Image (spheres, grey):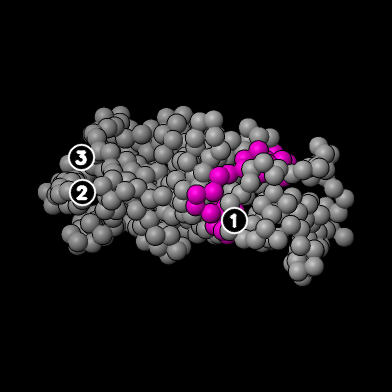
Amino acid sequence: MGAAEATHGHARGAAAKMEQLDRQMGLAGLGREVGVGKPINLESGLAGETKESRGAGAPGGAGDALLDVRAKLERLFKREVKGIVLSGLEEVEGVERAARLLRNLVRKGTLKVGDQVPGNHLADAIGVHRNTMSKALKQLADEGLVKLRRGRPARIVAVQAALPPETRRSAMISHAKAARDHRLEISTAIWDVRQCPLSAVEEGPRARVGRCLALADTDEVIEFSRIRLLSSEGHRWFPGLAELAFFAAKRTPAFFFEDLQEAPHVGSIYDFLLEHGIIAVNSEYRVQIERLPRLFVQSWAGIAGSTPARVANLPFLRLETTTHSPQGPLQYSIAFVKEDLYVLSGTDLAVEIRPEGVLAAEEPRILRPEPIRGFRAAS
């Protein structure tokens, strides 16, 4: 039997054992006489368990380990714990394992708004260090699900991640829509996308990405960068803006990264999020004048028929924002647009394009390049 077949066999075995345990619920009881929805007694603990019994290495592989975790949780909460609460725990470790369990407990109603979080007992149940559980609780506090209290257990305050208040929300700027409103065509010239740990992100934006997306250095991010071209009827294509976006991989749906690989066909990021079932809002924009990052300079110069030295000294309008979804902060992005091309106006930062900027744009050496992957050598 190959490794893949063995893995699938363990998964089927685990699923079968979960179903068997569910069928036995009416017989086994496991302390459910306390009932659902009553306050959690943090003093109950996991009485009678030894250090060895809390290990994850019990015979029978992942299936038995998950059954063991489930039994511990049911003794802790004195109520039935749905098997789906354990969904995905076998795929992750450390802080993400603890955070995933907490989110599952909240979303499936095992932990309700107002409940105290028995962090130490949960850490023991899934076999992680208590400091690891503390880091996971900090992560959920950043997402707005729990409230941390010095010297006392954390408390559940929401069942889904908090979105920014109305006073801090901004309309999402769509460069594609702005181009269409001015009868301009917009296209992707050069792009790159990769998934990596936050620690592998370039040092410049790394700290702010981690802070805005509430990520640890070991958390995975999807980094997406591209240069977009504009063209008006009868005119050649010229570079109009560069975009650099970071997505919190753990908050993206299945196939998100794979679909982003089709970058030439990705128009508006907002529309791309909607296509994947993500309804997002932005917190307030940060706007300033800045030079183009080195990542884009060489490619921008080549497309524009200019020199890297000249492009490196051009002023660009830098738009920075964080996009939020019900799962938490999802995307941190920076757009660099030609300072002589765009005007921002209105309380919602509506985008207008200066027609004279379009007409005065330098003619590039190419008519319309096919979208190519660039910036980094493909691995």
The residue that label 1 is drawn on is: 38
Viewer-nearest of labels 2 and 1? Answer: 1
Q: Is residue 120 magenta?
A: yes
Q: Earlier in the sequence, mark 1 or mark 3?
A: 1
Whether residue 47 sits left or right of residue 322 in the image: it is right
- Mark 3 and mark 2: span between their CA atoms? 15 Å
- Return the residue nearer the eye: 65 or 377: 65
Q: Is residue 158 magenta?
A: no
From where the camera sits, is residue 124 visible? yes
Where disc 1 sits, the SS reads loop
**Three-letter residue code for mark 1:** Lys
- Return the residue nearer the eye: 226 or 159: 159
Q: Earlier in the sequence, mark 3 or mark 2?
A: 3
Whether residue 155 sits left or right of residue 270 in the image: it is right
Where disc 3 sits, the SS reads loop
Task: Give the x, y percent position of residue 353.
Answer: 17, 51
Kindly identify which numbered label has been placed on residue 339: 3
**Over which residues does the magenta segment extend?**
105-128
* Residue that appears at 76% across and 69% down: 26
Kindly identify which numbered label has been placed on residue 264: none
The residue that label 2 is drawn on is: 349
- Return the residue nearer the eye: 149 or 182: 149
Whether residue 337 sits left or right of residue 24 in the image: it is left
Task: Give the x, y percent position of residue 255.
Answer: 54, 59
* Residue that appears at 45% across and 31% down: 207
Do labels 1 and 3 touch, CB within 8 Å? no
Viewer-nearest of labels 3 and 2? Answer: 2
- Mark 1 and mark 3: span between their CA atoms? 60 Å
Task: Give the x, y percent position of residue 92.
Answer: 66, 47
In the rendered image, the quadrant that contains the N terminus is bottom right
- Mark 2 and mark 1: span between their CA atoms? 48 Å
Identity of the residue furthest to the front in this view: 34
